[in-house]
Image (tube, helix red, strand yellow):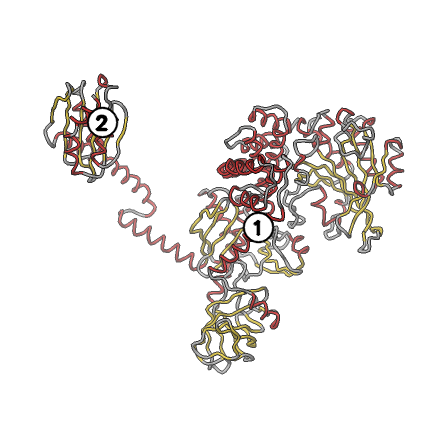
Amino acid sequence: METNQIRQKFIKYFQDKKHTFFKSDSLIPSSDPTLLFTSAGMVQFKNYFLGKQKLDAKEQRACSVQKCFRTSDIEKVGYTARHLTFFEMLGNFSFGDYFKKEAVAWAWEFLVKEIALDPARLYVSVYKEDSEAFDIWAGIVAKNRIIKLGDESNFWQMGDTGPCGPCSEILYDTGSDKGCGKKNCSPGCDCDRFLEIWNLVFTQFDRMSDGSLKNLPRKNIDTGMGLERLASVSQNAPTNFRTDELIKITDFVKNILFCGDVPESRVIADHGRGATFLIADGILPSNEARGYVLRRIIRRAVTKGKKSGINNPFLYSVCDKVIDTMKLSYPDIATKREQIVKIVKMEEEKFLLTLEKGMDILNSTIKKNQNITGADAFALYDTYGFPFDLTKEIAAESGLKVDEKGFETEMEKQKVRSKTSWAGSGEKDAGNYYEIHKKTGNTLFKGYDSFNTVAEVLVILKNNKHADFAKEGDDVEIITNETVFYGESGGQVGDTGKIVSSEGNLVIEVYDTQKPVENLIVHKCKIIQGNIKTGDTVKMEIAISRRRNIMKNHTVTHLLHAALRNILGQHALQRGSLVAENRFRFDFLHPVKIKENELYLIEKYVNERILANNSVNTKITDIAGAKSLGATALFGEKYGELVRCVIIGDEKKPESIELCGGTHCSATGEIGQFQVVAESSIGSGLRRIEGITGHFAYEYAKSQRDILEEASELLKTSPSAMIEKLKKQIAEKKKLEKEFNSIKNSVVSSCGAAVETAEIKGIKVLFKVVESGTIPGLRNILDSLHSKNTEGITLAGAIINEKPVILISVSKNLVPKITANSIAKELSSILGGGGGGKQEFAQAGGRYAEKLPDALASMENILDKFL
């Protein structure tokens, strides 16, 4: 039975059992973006199992075919029959509906009746204390085929506390020839003989902090079956890699490597498949988190290829084969083919530049039978792009170890160096502010709803030192108990404005606002009039017009983020931004330059949302609530207990929901208009869009219109007819240039000094010098002279662009005694330059125009040298 048939049979079987089919979630878990990857079918249902998200009554039963990715056993991939990094998991789930009896009966029926597996080759394991599951199975199979196992293999739990329960595994006997050969080899052995194909988890307990188990009020079923494993036993394939889909990819790799069914070909096939699906789901190679794992498997595959003698990029073609093989089941990978192939090829090319040198260093150490030091492992990582895990793996193949602690120490040193370098470029030490924050507590920010407030002065800093008092002319930092000034953070610049007294005798210019530590806002000020002391009550007023412009730019970055992900793909995630008054920039993941039509669609997408005047609202919730809303949360970000969601549009069907602490418009219409002014690369896989909004966009558009109008006046035509007129003028210009050059060449050919003739060593030498000309004109002269000297040497010289040029022609009968190329080199040495060409035609040139006569006069000496 083909793999795709198994997929379809599984879905239909459980749909007939009243299960709702859920499409595969992304490999970036939507239910919890803080997880690295989706590693099991239950991940997308995690919130249902935990009771954080409710299902409709008809969704109490679910089934799925889930894309999964794991690297926990990466070193076994290709060396065993069953291990993979990327795989598909078939699963059926019950959320408080059916339980063990139905789960067991349906699993057995599907395998035996639908897939037609031989029941004589099936075994079952149950948790040693789960008598209920044992009894249910005993009604289906002989008791001697039911094995009781312990906590390690047959008890599942999500963490130290929380939902957990026993599980039951269905195992397939692949035959004694696949086993370890030990007398005690039986179900539960870690060899390849007894293959686990389906795991049924019975979530029935809640583990307390003291370790005790309490019954859950609502019991759940969570099952998972590896599609590739089921296909291998159904097709009687010796390994996952010989099943109908994977065999196409593995054989393609074998043809590249010119090898048989070896571990290297299987590793490359697996990693090519993994890379294809990771990139399709929006992950790009990097040195952090998910991107690091992707980079690791690409570089691991490239290293395996290198060991097999492949020195050029090849994995991108494997990914192309993966797409051809699996596009029927996953059409999205076909639509992203160009992007996937480009990213993998770029990553290969980058790594191949340093791979050979890095391998030489690594192999040199290995040959000495020495363990790899932390410093060496770090050098391989930092200079040659070797992921630490890859270095460790290559060393392990030779029985050597890597100093992991030493590597981590070197990494920490690098972080310190980086921080020192950054601080040296202007960043102030935050240590002093931490101490201040401990005393003052949090600054209450009121700037979301108001542009002014009354506050108490808590701290005055002069030259980074505490001061009780400051006078007119002083530059100071002021900290108040509350403020409307936004402290620079999240890419948004700090507010400016003024601090005044109610009496009117105090005016302080606030020229910047910073947030050196979380929840502490510091106003950078110049005292224009009056004096101030700690304890004073003052009025805080931000520059309103400036703030409104900043708000427009910040809100538009959220719309732009949504546009990028909708038009370029879900991989186009934000990686940085600057939100200022008169402009903004937005950095994001994307491997290639954005096409003109894509840029147009992005700009159009954002402006349509501006014209729709969608509402912009905020909602304070916990992280779980934000995720249930679908808010964008990035892996690795640290969030507090409560987060602020900025929602553009209807909350039920929003244009955008992002976790954000910045200031925003109340409706998108306030933005006015949006224009992209630049798009560029800022690093490997990173792009930057720069844009403007509001009246800045209007002024920009007006300046472009003014230029257009001025150009149309110069061309004496309307703006709409300018392009056609320019095309005609350019064509006319080219025609005139061609005619001019033709006339010029003909004039050059017919003017200048007379033709000089000499006979040297019995060879007729003709040469002519013109005062100025062009290379084509000079060539015309040479050809004309050569036609009169078909058995000799002909030269034509000129000063072109203030530099000497000599063209040389040598007749066939003189080659190879003497060649035009050898004469050109001799002449060039006199002219102070270089020359070369072919045996019958060459060109000499140089820097010294005054040497042109000397060079031509040297022909006798040159011929003496060669003849």
In this view, the residue in front, 320 or 103, is 320
Residue 52, horizontal then vertical, whole percent:
73, 53
Whole-Å distance between the Cαs marked 1 and 2?
60 Å
Residue 270, horizontal then vertical, whole percent:
63, 33
Q: Residue furthest front?
A: 368
Residue 419, horizontal then vertical, whole percent:
52, 57
Neighbourhood count class around disc 1 (C-alpha, 10 Å): few under 14, some 14–19, many 20 upward: some
Q: Residue furthest left?
A: 754
Q: Is residue 712 above or below residue 852?
A: below
Q: Quadrant of residue 38?
A: top right
**Residue sitting at x 46%, y 59%:** 425
Mark 1 or mark 2: name the one nearer the start of the chain. 1
Neighbourhood count class around disc 2 (C-alpha, 10 Å): few under 14, some 14–19, many 20 upward: many
Quarter placement of the N terminus:
top right
Quarter placement of the C terminus:
top left
**Residue sitting at x 73%, y 33%:** 10
Left or right of 372 on screen, residue 600: left
Element type where label 1 sits in the image: helix
In this view, the residue in front, 705 or 451, is 451
Q: Which mark is residue 411?
A: 1
Q: Which mark is residue 823?
A: 2
Question: Identity of the amino acid at label 2?
Answer: Ile
Res 129 seen here? yes
Question: Identity of the amino acid at label 1?
Answer: Met
Left or right of 856 on screen, residue 581: right
Element type where label 2 sits in the image: helix
Q: Residue furthest top?
A: 813
Q: Is residue 259 above or below residue 167?
A: above
Residue 640, horizontal then vertical, whole percent:
65, 60
